[in-house]
Image: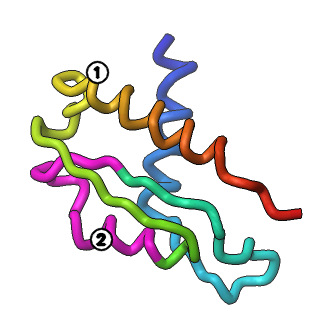
Amino acid sequence: MRELILPVLRNDYRAIESYHHDPRAAGCAPVLSCPIVVIIDDSDPQTDVADTQAWCTHTTGRFELITFSGGHFFINDHTAAVTALVADRMATAASLKVPR
């Protein structure tokens, strides 16, 4: 099992540590026009609220930053609230008229 899982985890951490979005890079996707909703914990040492706010630069649409308490695994304590939030935002997005 370890032989299957460790390479994937190592690659995930490598991507996290080395990725830097450069909007000027060749082939880079344009800024999105869809809404972006970011859900984080307000005290997670791995996720800084100020850094997370930078996601707003990736869309011309609505940006929403929602914080919960409970540490890195806040979703375990707020499963119903997070599920309801995602379902609500998905329903809202599905009702938006898609430009052609």
Asked if the magenta segment contains residue 51, the reply would be yes
Q: Give coordinates of residue 41: x percent, y percent.
A: 19, 46
Numbered tag placed on residue 53 in the rendering: none
Vertically, is 79 above or below 10?
above
Identify the amino acid type marked 1: Ala
| Closer to the camera in the image, 63 or 41 | 63
Task: Kindly report which numbered mark, 2 or 1, lies closer to the viewer in this rendering.
Answer: 1
Mark 1 and mark 2 in contact (Cβ < 8 Å)?
no
For the record, the magenta segment spans: 39-56
Q: Residue at x 55, y 44 (%)?
A: 92
Vertically, is 94 above or below 33?
above
Q: Residue at x 11, y 36 (%)?
A: 70
Structural crowding at the residue carrying mark 1, measured as other residues with C-alpha within 10 Å and reported as few (<14), some (14–19) or many (≥20): few
Q: Give coordinates of residue 8: x percent, y percent.
A: 55, 33
Task: State the residue position of label 1.
Answer: 80
Q: Secondary structure at mark 1?
A: helix
Numbered tag placed on residue 51 in the rendering: 2
Q: Residue furthest top?
A: 1
Asked if the magenta segment contains residue 53, the reply would be yes
Q: Give coordinates of residue 48: x percent, y percent.
A: 22, 63
Disc nearer the start of the sequence (2/1): 2
| Closer to the camera in the image, 75 or 26 | 75
